[in-house]
Image: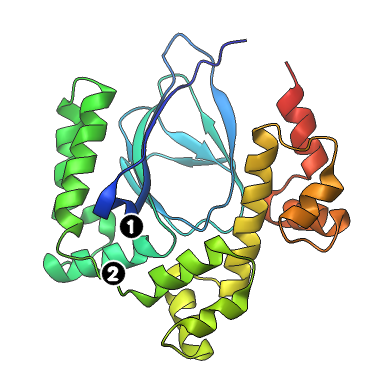
Amino acid sequence: MTSPLLFNIHFPQGLLSLWLQAIWSAQVPMDQPGVTRRLVADAGSGILFNLGVPVLIDQQEFQDQVMFQATNQRAHLIHLSSGTDLIGVRFQPGMGRLFQTKLAKQQDMTGPLQTSEFIQSLLVQLKYCLNTEERIDLLDKAFYQRVSSMTDIHDPVLKAVELLQQSSRVDLLDALPLSQRQIERQFQHRLSMSPKYFQRLRRVRAVLLALKEGKNHTRLAELAIEYGFSDQAHMTRECQLIAGITPKRYINRKLLP
């Protein structure tokens, strides 16, 4: 059965990829039924531009045309009704808060990110774009131009995130020129979580992505060891806690026609 959801995604390259995971678009035509999707926690944050009908996230309705999505620490259910027309940017872990801080300094901004001149200007321009490709191109160029003057390749949080995504060993952070307490403080400020919780979250996400790709459907015990869990039961508990679904339930829902 073909999904009524029209989804497009663009993965930024070069400098912009340090800040943004993706630029995406989601639409549901007026003559199609609504859809519900699970948003797996990824420790990222984002900005959502809503050019259509209100959206439901965990049964709560959001009508704002611009919404800043805080760091995602657990799974959410989003319902997209007929007439949905969304486009957004997804920041890399820890970079959304940094972007907001630096933008506030550049534009002498005292209110929330949604009210900034930069974001409001983008909202107006997006309304005049004729198609999805133009919208994505607009956001790609606008954010690239904006972050060009913000980037610090020696950002300790960026380095820590990179290390934790490459390995399950938290002790690798000892290689950074910061104390454990400083790293903890930086993570809490930028991601609202500890390095250990970040690692737990990314590990669960990796398991669900592997299952989505059809990997080890019948060998969950082996999958648990591969992704750093002590055993299958440990993996099941973590997935239930962070993603709101066990690996077996995730597989069964994925295999439904």
Q: Which sits in the foreground, 246 or 58?
A: 246
Q: Is residue 113 above or below residue 186?
A: above
Which residue type carries mark 2?
Ile
Q: Is residue 44 visible?
A: yes
Which residue type carries mark 1?
Leu
Q: Is residue 155 above or below residue 89?
A: below
- What's the residue at 33%, 57% (across, down)? 18
Q: Give the residue pinned by disc 2.
A: 153
Where is residue 175 shown, x and y percent of the image? 49, 83
Please state if 107 lies on the left or on the right of 90 as rendered.
Answer: left
- What's the residue at 48%, 91% (across, down)? 179
- What's the residue at 23%, 65% (across, down)? 151
Image quarter for residue 19? bottom left
Query: Neighbour class for label 2 at 10 Å: few (<14), some, many (≥20)?
Result: few
**Sequence-wise first label, 1 or 2:** 1
Q: Give the residue pinned by disc 1.
A: 18
Q: Is residue 102 above or below residue 15?
A: below
- What's the residue at 28%, 64% (across, down)? 100
Q: Is residue 140 above or below residue 7?
A: below
Where is residue 123 shown, x and y percent of the image? 21, 39
